[in-house]
Amino acid sequence: MTLRTLDSLGSLAGKRVVVRCDLNVPLQDGKITDDGRVRASIPTLDALINQGAKVVVISHLGRPDGAPDAKYSLAPVAQRLSELLGKPVTFAQDTVGAGAEAAVAGLHDGDIALLENLRFNPGETAKDDAEREAFAAKLAAFGDAFVSDGFGVVHRKQASVYELAKALPSAAGTLIATELDVLDRLTESPERPYAVVLGGSKVSDKLGVIGHLLPRVDSLLIGGGMLFTFLAALGHKVGSSLLEADQIDTVTGYLATAKELGVTIVLPRDVVVASKFGADAEHVVRPIDAIEDTEWGAAGLGLDIGPETGELFSEYIRGAHTVFWNGPMGVFELAPFAAGTKAIAQALTEVDGLGVVGGGDSAAAVRALGFSDDQFGHISTGGGASLEFLEGKHLPGLEVLGWQQ
Ligand SMILES: Nc1ncnc2c1ncn2[C@@H]1O[C@H](COP(=O)(O)OP(=O)(O)OP(=O)(O)O)[C@@H](O)[C@H]1O
Ligand SMILES: O=C(O)[C@H](O)COP(=O)(O)O
């Protein structure tokens, strides 16, 4: 079966259409610092509005604990959505309560509403199937059809991604269709050499994909928060850097597998060690075997790859014909720790072939560092989702829409 696309739903004029977007944008002091995911959701929403549908948008933001939490409110996103669409967006203060019911009931043809953060409700991410189904049923009551367009969450078996698609006539929106077109080129005979660059802070999520990626790539470059688990596996001390101590054995296994497969795992040679986590931290560059060899000792923490590593990684990237990069190389949000990410972004713009950036924070990073979207082959809205796609995993949010890899 192939992906069911929007046209499979027939005419949606006058119908209530629930649309799952991934509007999980980075926020600072309540302000959106990168609106890429909001922009990416516009084509589908515009198409539905233009058809005269009554559009009910749903999304998560961050990882709240199944209860309302003001700092994860989608209110700033409603405002940005309205600016980008050039029309009012009704914002409901809850997801399935009286506020949402009133917002949906008040929609006329061609109107649009955004409901509050899905993850303010325990049913969205519940482990128990019945709990997720019950929450999906409440969401389904708001629509005659469901459009799934949050590519960044298709790897999550969550109520609004999976169960809701079963509860209503459903199809993929144009963002998902576009993402799959490009990412398919990375799985179906990518031009060699093929390099994958991994970083970021969702270390346990991303370490898990490495085992499946190894047989598919020629080189794997490791930066960001996960590099310290690799350094620890090689016996280095990593101070107070991000570390998944319980993953050290797994990582040791990856290093051995890579050797057997003839895949190069490229690890940093130097890192930027800081006195603390903050823009005003003191910091020095240290070789990887001397991270604790600073005046801060074991309290020092690695917040970026060093300049020698930036050059080494850039050489690998420029030498490849296909490159996928997910996860910033350092804490790019703080100016002293942005250089590694900038070096890698620059190299990616110089790839002779297809260079893809994946992930909400990675996309935000390249834009914040002054690059424009058209300098890259593709900027995917999915971080974990695109990685799991590339490793060939069955993604619940795609399979439920008819997609088979
Ligand atoms: N050495 C480090 N220590 C701590 N945090 C780091 C380090 N290197 C990178 N980060 C952080 O990683 C975060 C991004 O990681 P994440 O894994 O979420 O990226 P992403 O996959 O692009 O985003 P998403 O998962 O939202 O799509 C950034 O906020 C950055 O500050
Ligand atoms: O940022 C992402 O990768 C997506 O929005 C999914 O978020 P999650 O990792 O919290 O499920």
Image (spheres, helix red, strand yellow):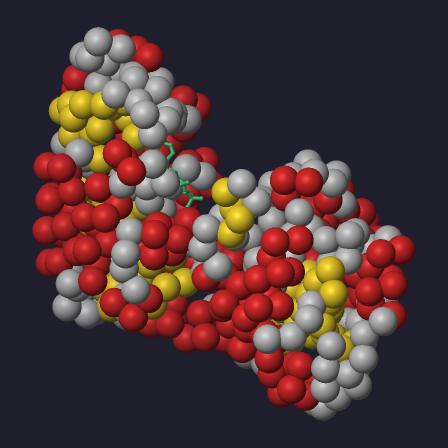
Q: Residue 155 at x, y = what percent? A: 54, 55
Query: Is residue 24 among the parts visible in the rendering?
Result: yes
Residue 339 sits above or below residue 137 on the image: above
Task: Kindly identify the residue that appears in the image at 16 percent across and 46 percent down.
Answer: 313
Write down the quadrant of residue 69 in the picture: top right
Residue 88 sits above or below residue 265 on the image: below
Q: Report the label total.
A: 0
Query: Who is closer to the viewer here, 402 or 145?
Result: 145
Task: Kindly identify the residue that appears in the image at 87 percent across and 63 percent down.
Answer: 102
Query: Who is closer to the viewer here, 38 or 186?
Result: 38
Write down the quadrant of residue 186 in the picture: bottom left
Task: Kindly identify the residue that appears in the image at 44 percent across and 24 percent down.
Answer: 246
Write down the quadrant of residue 86 in the picture: bottom right
Q: Is residue 25 left or right of residue 347?
A: right
Question: The N terminus is located in which quarter?
Answer: bottom right
Q: Residue 79 at x, y = what percent? A: 62, 61
Residue 60 sits above or below residue 307 on the image: below
Q: Residue 145 at x, y = what percent? A: 75, 76
Query: Is residue 301 among the parts visible in the rendering?
Result: no
Residue 49 sits above or below residue 123 on the image: below
Q: Is residue 59 left or right of residue 306?
A: right
Q: Residue 263 at x, y = what percent? A: 20, 48
Query: Who is closer to the viewer here, 164 or 23?
Result: 23
Task: Kindly identify the residue that appears in the image at 60 percent across and 80 percent down.
Answer: 46
